[in-house]
Amino acid sequence: MYKIPQISFDATILSSPIEYLKGVGPLRADLLKKELQIFTFKDLLDHFPLRHIDKTKVNTIASVNQSMDYVQVAGTITEIVTLGENRSKRLVATLRDATGEMELVWFRGIQYIGKGIEVGRPYLVFGKPGYFNSTLQITHPEMENYTPEKAGGRSWLEPVYPSTEKLKIKSLGGRQIGKLTSGLVSSLTERDLPENLPESIVRHFGFPTRFEAYSRIHFPASEPEYKAAVDRLRFEELFIAQLRMGLIRLERHRYSKGVVFAQVGELFNTFYHQYLPFALTGAQKRVLKEIRQDMAHGRQMNRLLQGDVGSGKTMVALLAMLLAADNGFQSGLMAPTEILATQHYTGITGLLKDMPVNVALLTGSTKAAERKKILKGLAAGEIHLLIGTHALLEEKVAFQNLGLAIIDEQHRFGVEQRARLWKKAAIPPHILVMTATPIPRTLAMTAYGDLDYSIIDEMPPGRKPITTVHRYEYARASVMDFIRSEIDKGRQAYIIFPLIEESEKLDLENLMRGYENVKAFFPEPKFWISMVHGKQTPDVKETNMQRFVRHDTQIMVSTTVIEVGVNVPNASVMVIESAEKFGLSQLHQLRGRVGRGSEKSFCILLTGPQITNEARERLKTMCATNDGFLIAEKDLELRGPGDIEGTRQSGMLNFKLADIVRDKSWLDAAKQFAESVVVTDPSLQSAENLRLKAYLHSQKGKHAWSKIS
Ligand code: ADP
Ligand code: MG
């Protein structure tokens, strides 16, 4: 009979509290916890060195200069003196080798150090070189007795650990941490860090074992050995994360019960064949098929739909909602702002005007009587399609049988709000989250790997790319002239002001100044201007917006409240004021407000004369491409994954070693191997995957794997 190998990840020495490590004790333990979040032996082991120093390399004194980070010199002490009084009191030793002389200086521990150093003796000295009064010196160097054979015979790299000032004062600087780590590592055996990757993977990459990797990432014998250890641990991190998400997704597919939309019925077909105002793009068709497949099989759909601004997500949403209605279910469509909800409502009721589908709009400003009517209609199942804002989430909003909930512009909603949608039906409704903030593929598969994921990566035909330029303040007049020429051709323009100041009041003042300025260029009655900002009541906002939509006004001056979703195809110019203050994804969102009609459109990024290199890089990217995914990749590169909207809370990007931008090829490999495990052995039963099972089991509860829905 086959004997199951015993692998235990539990109750090893590594879970011991850090105070029990030799040389730590309660006081230092407190500091390690507070300053470095090191609570256990394992945490210390995971406190990786910043870099390593090759102590076998000895510099000659003549070759040392200030620009070197660290040097190591070997020489004889020729003189030791104490100089200065009080605060400038210092110990100065002169070190000489065959090529020259330098000073070694100590301000603290003078007595103690002075006693330990002998004139005439050879030392190996290590530290950061600098000049003082044009004399080369090292302050507070590390010293040890030197014999040439010793230096030559040693072939290891010394780790340098991150530490903090507070720790350094308490004798827990990088070196001391290294000593603790060294003690820990030498007390560990293979059994404390059992292999967790399947043998085939270890062999495929020629990885060191997990135990070897952990010892060598701290104390490698050579550069290649170090690199192999880092690669292995990076891969492990990414692989485990991918595996975990793959298993979560699989489990959801298997066990989550969902309502079945068995048929494509009358409503869908009639609309599709008679009222669809354009042919769907290939991408829209593909996504619709993915959605239909999800909903037909009795498991709950939990799908993220990504499509660049203007890629036509709304039509996909509408068709999915008709599918729900065909199967006797109600749908909810939730938008982040009142303007957007209203626009969806107007657009959708327009499209459905000859169809027997009841659509209602519910927002914060729906009047009490109307609201009451809507709630009644919902409970009775008479309203098929409810469009609205956060108002949809309120407890009182009860559906008769909600089957599909669609959330537009996902990043404005929190995880918790989405969860509230689930609870509005006995069997959780299908969820479709639509986002126009392109998330780089790498990020999406890491942060949302447990969700089903669709992309609309094709624009409706006939779109002309938007021409984007960067202009400085002083060219404002010519920018205004350009707007005038577009208005003369019958077009409209947006002028957007940033929300940046600490106070709303200042932002508003800034906007007002801008508005007056624009007005001076575009006087009534030839020109009319709409203004929309966050401090207006929904009524006023809506009125101003509608005036622009109806072309009663030619210019829309606004803060970023119009950022998402607003659709005015006749607008052909987008001017972004203080563009250097916006992030890339926001700039791209804003630009997406134009280029929606058949006319050529323009985006003008106005900035002051002084801009940072990073801002310049953003502007350059905007001028160079219209591709939201490319922009998202660039954004990720510039800012790092922690700052990308909507992912901060995911907790899945906090890798210790891996970096999904730099380690993209490792990520791809990890995903591929993890998927193959999920497909071939989802319950991790094969002998080769038992290690994985034991490891995942030991990690339960250690991570907050927040799903987005
Ligand atoms: P977004 O994905 O940004 O929400 P929308 O759904 O608002 O995009 O669509 C943008 C515009 O493109 C709308 O005016 C819509 O009617 C139009 N549109 C959508 N799909 C197509 C298509 N297949 N062919 C032509 N126009 C389309
Ligand atoms: Mg939209």
Image (cartoon, grey):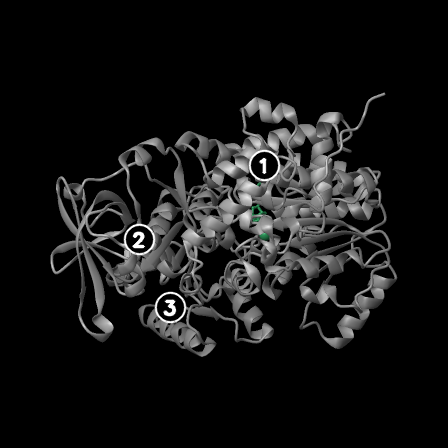
Element marked by disc 1: helix
Q: Disc 2 versus disc 3: distance between alpha carbons?
A: 41 Å
Q: Amino acid at mark 1?
A: Glu
Disc 2: CA contacts within 10 A as few (<14), some (14-19) or many (>=20): few
Question: What secondary structure is marked by label 3?
Answer: loop
374 relative to 140 in the view: left or right: right
The numbered dot on residue 236 is: 1
User: In percent of the image, x 17 and y 70: which residue is there?
Assistant: 84
**Which residue in the structure is indicated by mark 2?**
613
Q: Earlier in the sequence, mark 1 or mark 2?
A: 1
Q: Is residue 631 visible?
A: yes
Q: Amino acid at mark 3?
A: Lys
The amino acid type, in three-letter code, at marker 2 is: Asn
Q: Which residue is mark 3?
A: 526
| Pointer 2 or 3: first along the chain | 3
Q: Nearer the viewer, mark 1 or mark 3?
A: 1
Give the spatial CA distance, label 1 vs label 3. Answer: 66 Å
- Residue 591 in the image: x percent, y percent? 44, 52
Label 1–label 3 contact, CB within 8 A: no
Q: Are marks 1 and 2 in contact (CB under 8 Å)?
A: no
Q: State the SS at label 2.
A: helix
What residue do we see at 79% from left, 45% from top? Answer: 300
